[in-house]
Image (tube, rainbow, N blue to C red):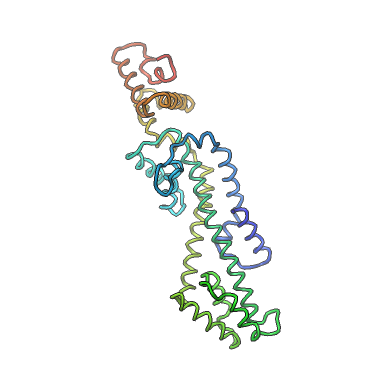
Amino acid sequence: MLREAYRAVAAATREERAITPAAEWLVDNFHVVDEQLREIRDDLPSGFYRELPKLADGPLAGYPRVYGIAWAFVAHTDSRLDLEMLRRFVLAYQRVQPLMIGELWAVAITLRVVLVENLRRLAESIVRGGRMRGEADALADELLGIGGDGAVAPTARGLARFEGAPLVTAFAVQLVQRLREQDRAVTPALLWLDQRLAAQGTTSDDIVRVEHQRQAAMNVTVRNVILSMSLMSALDWTEFFESVSLVDGVLRAAPNHAAMDFATRDAYRHAIEELARGSDCSELDVAREAMAQAQRAGRAAEDERRQDPGFFLVGSG
């Protein structure tokens, strides 16, 4: 759908037809969107997806729980990514329900999925609006006699094609803007348009205002999506992960934890995931038990290696 929208907007640009600011953002930055699609395919293999816990009920039942979190965040921020806000959002969620290590790693890629899906929805609206404005232009050309023998004969026939269904806002606004301040030949068409809008409970001034507000809001959202996509590729997601991981919060109490390199900390996390999968314990329970074992060993003044939780996770403990 996104590629189809890109082609439609690019074609309109080549034909020098007017496009909306949101459409300009889409066509000018489509390389950013294409990059997200590639990263999603690379970073979200089906095996990893199947391991993510799924929601049991609600509108997103069957989707991963982390997808619900990403969806809510994007909805509440109008697709504008702020890393500190996302950090607070994920930590607040975990005050009620701790997330698994795999879910936290999936936050970034799931955000990409939700942003792409949101942009897909907007792209559909952009294409639909462009098509409706094109139909309105064709009708206006017919009513104004552009490319024909005059406006009088085709007026009734042209308007009859649009009877029987409510007028789409983008179509009506384009028609209003084309026919306003024209000569008296199109007066019947303007009267017809006013009557149709009145039957829908609105006026030409109202729909122009509503359409301008809608286009402005869509422009902001499309811009936010594109900028958020660009920002995501530049962020250090490993630092974000460790800042929101409750398991890391437990392990940080170990004396040497901060001095370890990332690969060592990651080895501890992999061990915690494996032990949790093979037991009835949660990942947090496993991390706390490893810390408890290390603290007991420290009090017993045994081999100092035993005072590190890694002895009980990746060592012989």
Residue 259 shows up from this direction: no
Q: What residue occupies the far front of the structure in this picture? A: 164
Q: What residue occupies the far bottom of the structure in this picture? A: 184
Q: What residue occupies the far left of the structure in this picture? A: 299
Q: What residue occupies the far top of the structure in this picture? A: 302
Residue placed most toward the observer, 192 or 303: 192
Which quadrant is the C terminus positioned in?
Answer: top left
Image position of 289 (left or right of 20): left
Q: Quadrant of residue 135?
A: bottom right
Residue 8 shows up from this direction: yes
Residue placed most toward the observer, 296 or 93: 93
User: Residue drawn at (52%, 70%), measured in percent from left and top?
Assistant: 168
Residue placed most toward the observer, 153 or 43: 153
User: Residue drawn at (58%, 56%), measured in percent from left and top?
Assistant: 26
Q: Quadrant of residue 312?
A: top left
Residue 17 position (above or below residue 203): above
Q: Quadrant of residue 275?
A: top left
Residue 157 position (above or below residue 72): below
User: Residue drawn at (65%, 82%), measured in percent from left and top?
Assistant: 154
The percent coordinates of residue 132 (x first, y second) are 58, 68
Residue 255 position (above or below residue 157): above
Residue 117 position (above or below residue 286): below
The percent coordinates of residue 263 (x first, y second) are 49, 26
**Number of marks:** 0
Image position of 192 (left or right of 252): right
The percent coordinates of residue 249 (x first, y second) are 36, 31
Which quadrant is the N terminus positioned in?
Answer: bottom right
The percent coordinates of residue 297 (x first, y second) are 32, 15
